[in-house]
Image: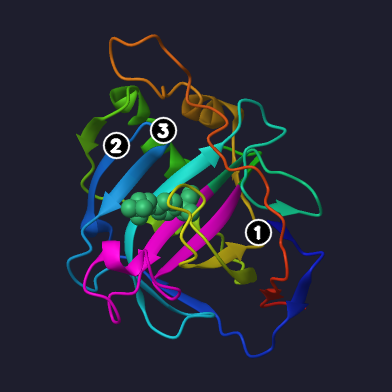
Amino acid sequence: HPLWQNSVYDPVLKPLKISYDPTTCLHIWNNGYSFLVEFDDSADRSIIVGGPLENQYRLKQFHFHWGAINEWGSEHTVDCKFYPAELHLVHWNAVAYPTFEEAVMEGDGLAVIGVFLKLGAHHEGLQTLVDALPAIKHKDTVIEFDVFDPSCLIPQCPDYWTYAGSLTTPPLTESVTWIIKKQPIEVDENQLEAFRMLLFTSDGEEEKRMVDNFRPLQPLMNRTVRSSFQ
Ligand SMILES: NS(=O)(=O)c1ccc(C(=O)NCC(F)(F)F)cc1
Ligand SMILES: [Zn+2]
């Protein structure tokens, strides 16, 4: 969604508090749309609270969206500008709902932190993920991933935009409180290229490179985007 132009500063918005336990990391896999790092969400061990949220939310997985070239790839824009990639950290409201699947259907069910990736310096923390990608080149391949702290992918700057939105892939349910960080993280060209080496296709099928796995921009309609900063 086009951020900034239609956003209004909300002084009531609190800082977002993020506390992840790196040992809740389970595995990294290629689901045929993106690559996901999944976490053990059977207890409140990796959670976010505060910001625009009423409850605390549990981390379930994170994944990315990216383009075939650096001119586009993100699912949100700032000043009409796309970033080459966007990270989504997906959390669910385990206080209000017994399962993730149920939370997906509720207006306050999910909270997704969006982080823009921009071309720049090498990102040490991301490299750990990049090194695992060749092992999950094909759809439905998975490798164990024991310890990873996703906080290393979230910029220090506390500023964010927030709005009530939806999943960006089917079933597109309107269950997401979006929290988009203003500051991007920097990654280098080799790291972006590593994303583009993944395949949408399974082993043995005709290879289709996993690129442009983003939803096209959607109209904001009558939604208000609030900013935590002036
Ligand atoms: N790209 S996004 O909006 O962060 C996004 C986040 C999560 C899901 C997801 O879990 N879909 C599976 C479900 F829930 F069963 F439907 C889809 C999209
Ligand atoms: Zn996503």
Q: Is residue 144 left or right of 192 when viewed as pictured? A: left
Magenta includes 89? yes
Report whether the residue tagged 2 is closer than 8 Å to ligand 1: no
What residue is drawn where x is 69% and y is 75%?
227
Q: Is residue 52 above or below residue 47?
A: below
In the visual, does 94 lie left or right of 224? left
- Mark 2, mark 1: which one is toward the viewer? 2
Res 30 → quadrant: top left
Residue 183, which numbered label?
1
Disc 2 + disc 3, Cβ < 8 Å = no
Label located before the other in sequence (1 or 3): 3
For discs 2 and 3, the disc positioned in front in the rendered view: 2
Indicate the amino acid at tag 2: Trp
The span picked out in magenta is: 87-116
Q: Measuring 52% from the left and 60% from the top, which residue is drawn there?
A: 166
Q: What residue is shown with label 3?
A: 130
Tell me the quarter of the picture where residue 181 sits. Answer: bottom right
User: What x and y, as percent, mark residue 202?
Assistant: 31, 19
Q: Secondary structure at mark 2?
A: strand
Residue 146 coordinates in the image, percent (x, y): 20, 47
Calculate the distance from the C-alpha at mark 1 to the C-alpha at mark 3: 22 Å
Q: Residue at x 72, y 56 (%)?
A: 219
Separation (CA) of disc 2 from disc 1: 27 Å
Three-letter amino acid code at the position of disc 3: Val
Total tally of numbered discs in the picture: 3
Q: Quadrant of the N terminus?
A: bottom right
Residues packed near mark 2 inside 10 Å, few (<14), some (14 to 19) or many (20 plus): many
Circle 2 residue: 29
